[in-house]
Image (spheres, rainbow, N blue to C red):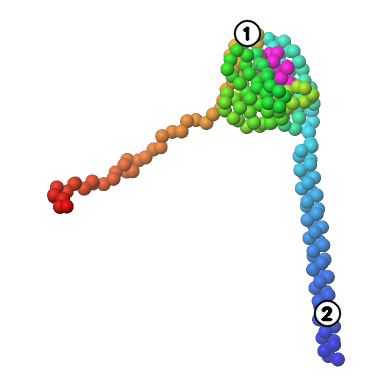
Amino acid sequence: MANAQVKKKKRRKSSGSSSQFFAVLIVFLAVYIVLSLFVAGLIYYSFNNTSDSSEIYSVSIIYDEKELYEIDAQDANNEYGLYVPFSYLSEIASFGLAGDGENVTLFLIGTENRIECQKNSSLIVINGNPIRISAPLLYEEGEYLIPVAMLEKYINGIDITYDNEEMICNISSDIGKSDIALKLLLPDGMKNAYFPESYKYYGDVPEESTDDVTP
């Protein structure tokens, strides 16, 4: 009789331990699911959230102090940054574009300066030097869109200024301007290694023996 009671107590303890285990497991899974949904929500929000129009720039294309185009903030900005259509850019500078749609070359007319690009890619080749830029070259509705960041960093001769009160990015050039050129921000040349004088001391060199060498 006593053995039967002991067995019942063991069964109750065993069933109680199992219940606690499953309860802890369910709570853990619930917390995991909630955290996963929260992280997924943050990722979705970061990729799909756009700034208010008051916090991003519109674009003004100016040639010889005359505004040719004005692009509102909604059209000038996307998830990669600020862009200007190539057709607008070509009206204020001597730029040309050649290619088959997938692979194109942006060049300065009358010079050897070239930027080789791929559609919707951030990898460009400037005068034979491959560079990864912060925003890709885009192709939308038959028009190439050039990131303003690329103009600022790799092209000389086009003036880019920002009006922080009116939230306007002004991209301008003057008639007869001939100093437009591509530029590269390459790392500085490596300097020669420095060795202190103590590194150059090798100790006394033993004198050569004058004894005859016996074969």
Callout 2 amino acid: Arg
Seen at 79% across and 31% down, the residue is 52
Residue 53 lies left or right of residue 199; in this view the side is: right
**The stretch drawn in magenta includes residue 88:** yes
Seen at 57% across and 26% down, the residue is 128
Residue 192 lies left or right of residue 64; in this view the side is: left
| Residue denoted by label 2 | 11
Front one among 129 and 154: 129
Q: What stretch of residues is rendered in magenta? A: 85-93
Dot 1: element: loop
Q: How far apart are the two marked residues, 2 and 1, measured between alpha carbons?
A: 96 Å
The earlier-in-sequence mark between 2 and 1 is 2
Residue 26 lies left or right of residue 118; in this view the side is: right
Residue 83 visible in image = no
Mark 1 neighbour class, 10 Å CA radius: few under 14, some 14 to 19, many 20 or more: few
Relative to 22, say whether 67 is above or below. Answer: above
Q: Position of residue 11 (x, y in %)?
A: 83, 79
Label 2–label 1 contact, CB within 8 A: no
| Residue denoted by label 1 | 176
Mark 2 neighbour class, 10 Å CA radius: few under 14, some 14 to 19, many 20 or more: few
Q: Quadrant of residue 184?
A: top right
Task: Assign the N terminus to one quadrant of the image.
Answer: bottom right
